[in-house]
Structure formats: C-alpha cells, structure tokens
Amino acid sequence: MDVIVCMKQIPDLQQIRIKDREPILDNVPLVWGDLDKNAIEEASKIKEAVEDVKVTVVALGSDKIEQGILEPLAMGADEAVLLTDPAFAGSDSMGTAKVLAKAIEKTGSYDLVILGEGSTDNYSGVVASALAELLNLPMISYVRELEVQDGKVKAVRNMEESFEVMEADLPALVTVAQEINEPRLPKFMAIRKAGAKPRHEWGPDDLGLAADEVGQNALSVETLSNLAPEQDRKNIILKGNLAEQIDALVDALTKEGVLGR
Amino acid sequence: MTEADEEKVEVVVVGAGLAGLSAAYVLAQAGVDTVVVERGDYPGAKNVTGGRIYMHPLRHYLPDLWDDAPLERHVTRETITMMAEGASTAITLDNDKFREEPYHSYTILRSNFDRWFGDKVAEAGGFVLPKYRADDVLVEDGRVVGIVMGEEDEIRADVVVAADGVLSLIAEKAGLRQAQQPKHFAVSAKEVIELPAKSIEERFNLGPGEGAAQLYFGTLTKGMLGGGFIYTNQDSISLGLVVGIESLMEREPKIEVHEILEDFKARPEIRNLVADGEIVEYSAHAIPEGGINAMPKLYSDGIVVIGEAAGLGLNMLITVRGMEFAVASGVMAAEAILKAREKGDYSADSLAHYEELLKDSFALQDLETFRHVLGFMENPRLFNFYPQAVCDIFTELMWIDEKPKPKISTTVIREGVGKFLNWSTIKDGLGMLRI
Ligand SMILES: Cc1cc2nc3c(=O)[nH]c(=O)nc-3n(C[C@H](O)[C@H](O)[C@H](O)COP(=O)(O)OP(=O)(O)OC[C@H]3O[C@@H](n4cnc5c(N)ncnc54)[C@H](O)[C@@H]3O)c2cc1C
C-alpha cells in the first residue's frame, strides 16, 4: 500500500517578530508545521501496523530543506519528493494543491494521502479539500483516530461537540487533528540513516506545469494585507511592597475586564 | 564500513557554541565523521556574549573563516567609565590603529554568528543536530564511549568533545570536574536594543561600520563585584551587566540582576544612547570567574573539554574574554584528536596532547598571567570608593560657583592626598602590582 504524506516548511512561529504590525520573516528558521508532524507520525504508525506499506513524503519548502527532510524520513518515511523550486514559492492554497496533485500523480501510486488539517502558518485549511478534488478522492477531515483495514479507511472525526465515525474505500484522503497522536522524536541513528533514503527533486517541468501555472504567477486569491492586531502597551508600573503590588495588579486586571468577569 | 561502525560516529561534540563549532569545523574539514549536538533550536539560539571578539589572537586559528563571517562593527573607540552617585568620569581611547585593517576587534551577535558557523560546519561535511540535548556520558570499562540523550537515545563515538559551556554538565558527568563554588561565577543580564544604524552612528559618533565598546564600573553594581557594558552592533546595541554571584547572594537587601540593569539603563549617561530603541532580545547567563584556579581536568579516556566548559574565561573587570579561548581551544582539541586518530589511540595519554598545545598557547598563558585578578576585584573600594573619589575631584575642578576658586594645583593636591594617600589605597596599589 502506498501512503503519501504532504508536508510544508513554515517559518518557526516562535521566532517571528512583529514590527510595525508586520511579521519579520528574514532569517527565521524553517520548521515543519505541527500538524504535518502528526500526519507523518500517523503514516509511520500505519506502516508499523499494516504489512507492505510504503510511505512517501511530498514536501514543499526552500532550498534549506536538505537537513529538515531528514526528520520525516527518520520518523518513518521511505522516500521523499522535494518541491523546492523557487517557482513554487508564494503559491496560494489552490496553487499548492495543484502542485501537490501533480507530484502525487507522478509518484505513480497512492492509496492513502494524509495531511494536517491546516498549516500552522496560514491555517486556511483549503489545500486538502482542493487536493482531494483534483485527485478525485473521497476525503475525511479532522480525523482523531484512524484505522486502515481491508482496502478501507475508518476514521473518527472530531466535531468539537461530538465524534463522527466514517469509512471510505481506498484510495482516500484524510486530514488529521493534533490529538490523533504524539509525534515521535526520531533517534539520532535514524536521522543519520535517513540521509541514505531516496529523494527526488521535482520542478515545474517535471510536473508538466508551465511557469505561469505555479507560484506567484498563478494566484487565485490575493493577500491585501497581513497585519498583527494593534496592541497598545499600558505601561503601568506597580509600586510598593509585594502585597501592595499584587493588590494593584488584581485591581488593574479587573478594571481591564481580564479578571472577575 | 563494518556493521559496528555504522552504529557510531568518530567524534561527537556537545554544544554548538564557538568552541564546539570550531572543533567540529576543523574535524569535518579533515574528513572526520563529526556530529554536533545542540540543545537550542539552532546553533546560537541561546548563546550569550557581551560581545566583542579580538581578532589578532584568532586569525591563524581558522584562517579561511573570518573573511566573510557575519561580524558586526569593528571597534574604533574604547571608553571606560567610572560611575559614582549622580556623576561619572569617562576615559576614551581613539587610536588610528583601530581603523587599520585587519581590524583589531569586532562586535558580534552570537545568534547570527553561531548559526552561520553551524552552516559552515555542515558545508564542510559535519552534521549539526539541533534540538537535542546530551544528558550524560556513556562509560564502558572506565572510558567515555559516547553520550546519552533523553531516556533511550545515545550516540557512540571514539571521542566526546565537551563544549557545553560554562555550567558544563558533560565534564561533570565524566568526573572531570568538581561541583563549583558560587564565587567561581558571575551572572549577567543583557539586552539587545534595536536602533537604525544611522542613529547608532550619530549617538556614538561613529563612521559607517565603526563601532564603540564602552565599559562601566562603580556604583552601577551597588557595591558588588562587576560592571556594565555597551557594544554597538550594526543595527542594535548590546547593553548588559555582570555581577559576582557571591556578592549578589550576600547582599542585603536582596536585589535582582534585572533591577540593577533597569537602574543602569535609567542613568542619564545611558538613557539617551538607547532612547526609542526596541528590546529584541533579553538574556541572562553565567560567566566563569574562577580563572585558572578553577579549571577542570581537560581530558580523559575518550573525552576532551573545551571552551567555557573547560573554565577558559577571564573576567578582568574592564573586559570579559572567552570567545578567543573558545575558538583556540576548539581548534587545538581538534588537532589533538586528528593526531590521536592517526594512531588509532583515543586514550587519555594520547589526548594529553591537547593540554600541551593549550599550555603553549596564549589561552592558558593569559589565564596564568591574570590569575590574581579575581582576588583584586573582590575589593569593594573598586566599586564605590575610587569612582566616587575620582568624580569628586573632577567635579571640584569643573564646578564654578559664587565663591572664589582655589588654584587647580591646590585642589588636586588637597583632594588627591586626602583621598588617595592612606593605608587602604596604598595596599590596593601594591595589590595592583600583582595583576
Ligand atoms: C554577558 C557576557 C558577556 C561576555 N562578553 C564577552 C566578550 O565581550 N568577549 C569575549 O571574548 N567573551 C565574552 N563573554 C564570554 C563568551 O561569551 C564565552 O566565553 C563563550 O561564549 C564561550 O563559548 P563556548 O562555545 O565555550 O560556550 P557557549 O557559547 O556557552 O556554547 C555552549 C553551547 O552548548 C550548548 N549546550 C549546553 N549544554 C548542552 C547539552 N547538555 N546538550 C547539548 N547542547 C548543550 C548550549 O546551548 C550552547 O550552544 C561574555 C559572556 C557573557 C555571558
């Protein structure tokens, strides 16, 4: 069985600074989205539970992906497809889905495609649905429990107030929620050996896409602004001894409506 | 490669600071299978320095590295300021030598530099593993054979290089170092304050690319051993202070380091230099003060200790030095490892070559030369009496009021003799001859 996991490198959110309400992205290290890690973890678990599973990671990222890709490979993927061509950069959700669909088709065979329910940077949550449409696959989203058996996938969906149990014939696409698993921390030797696993780098040509069909040249949605909410600092300095300061803090927070609502 | 070889590496370096990366860089360039384990998100993520790095001792250690290294500004002006209550006196050195290439020293931001250096190590063929922490050494038959990470991971290696900084856990776990005393450390707090390059150049009277190093001692540490510093980076200012842990612990009433830093920043001498800047980084860090008296054993079977983990640091009141020692010790450890590798012998006897190299270098010699500095610095008069006396005399000279002024010589002699000629100061003068 062929399992495909789609992953995307994003700027490490903890390291982004906001200046004049704009995020400063220069020099911010790239990491995998948290939910992407849930996706690869789930694929690795399937591989451990079911015989004859091959896991392929299809990864979008920058040229600095070389080291980063070792992580999913060490977590259990057998092979990686790297979509790092600068032409892909700046794609919107539809563009991303298109590129992923072409790459997945090019791998030749796919029974189960797994993604995180959203990327932790933009969280538009559209890519998976678009991808399912392009690949013409049934889709189950927000999955918190997953089981593969007899050519079927059975999933429990998190509906916030309730759980929904669903089943689909393979091939299918699922998106996973964070509670589905605890991504493993790969061991050093696994990371080291991951370097020897096969990797393919595919650009637009390899996918049969023209330059104006990808990346910034093919936006269907335009981002007009991306601003952090305005935050005015109150600049209140509390005086007095510790007890007085605590009283003053409680007063101030109550006045702001943060406490005692 | 045999099956057994596949499960181990040749060298594992713990800590991607300047020391560890220098060692790894030399080893990787020589084709040694080297892994650097770093607990931070990336090399330099948490690394703190003042920072200024002196280039002359370093150039021949990693000759090909420095040309395109991301250093900040070359320092062209040195200022030492004595701070008293409500007054301060500064001495500034401008010297054309500071403007001649190759430059004497640069300011440096470690989060930028170490990250770049980590990439260099990777380019040279080393493997840098961030977000992994070494928790113990693996010992078999009395020799170190690797490190332990977390509950169930380990890296086996011919040699472990402990480069894990001032509080080195690895040296301690390997039994190379005793528990330390508080007086062997100082603690520091530092802020990086962002300002446009142009403002920095105007405020500090600098040309493009030029930098200032300013050191402060006196009342800012409230009678405690220590001092403050300001270094200008390209687009930011590093501002911080250092206080001896022992004097901090003994002080009544208690005070927190960040409060001392706030008071320092609020001084009019400092306030205007950093006005309107945005604090983009805040850090606290320990500094070794024990000097050569507090150094651990530097090697044993299968392990060497380098950089601050080896106690290689000097706090000489007016400057903290450690980065040159870190680089030099890393390179020397690598050289010793390369030699041991030729012999296929990583025993203590073989690795002892590292200590020989270190002893012949500026690093241990400087530490030896300045071994009495700490004792000298423990003198509280340095932090209250002298700065106050100097500022008082200077104020007396400069202050004009309605009363007639005495002759300058009268002022200087009266004040000078009164303040500086007594038993304590003569004793201090003699003490100074030892450092
Ligand atoms: C406030 C301050 C001002 C200073 N000013 C100057 C100056 O102006 N000039 C100068 O030359 N020196 C200065 N120093 C000293 C200088 O910064 C240090 O000597 C130097 O950084 C030491 O380098 P190192 O590589 O030995 O250690 P570090 O730079 O501390 O690197 C140690 C590395 O090991 C990692 N690590 C630690 N434990 C583990 C573990 N268990 N597993 C994995 N990784 C681990 C850490 O994350 C870190 O990356 C200053 C220091 C301070 C704190």
Image (cartoon, rainbow, N blue to C red):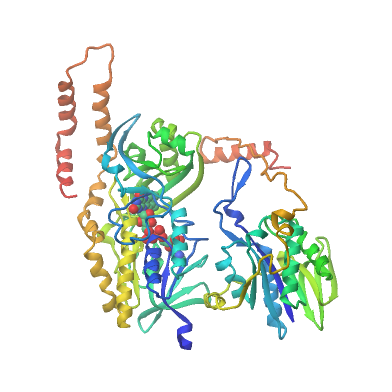
Q: Residue at x 45, y 84 (%)?
A: B5
Count of marks overlaid on the render:
0
Q: Is residue B180 above or below residue B336?
A: above
Q: Is residue B371 above or below residue B395?
A: below
Instruction: Give the x, y percent position of residue B279.
Output: 51, 42
The residue lying toward the viewer, choosing from A159 and A68, is A68
Q: Quadrant of residue A232?
A: top right
The residue lying toward the viewer, choosing from B107 and A135, is A135
Instruction: Give the x, y percent position of residue A117.
Output: 74, 63
Q: Quadrant of residue A150?
A: bottom right
Left or right side of A17 for A216: right
Ligand 1 located in image quadrant: bottom left
Residue B245 in view, yes or no = no
Q: Residue at x 14, y 44 (%)?
A: B430
Left or right side of B421 for B176: right
Instruction: Give the x, y percent position of residue B261.
Output: 42, 41
Q: Residue at x 15, y 21 (%)?
A: B410
Left or right side of B27 for A238: right
Residue B93 in view, yes or no = yes
Q: Is residue B195 above or below residue A161?
A: above
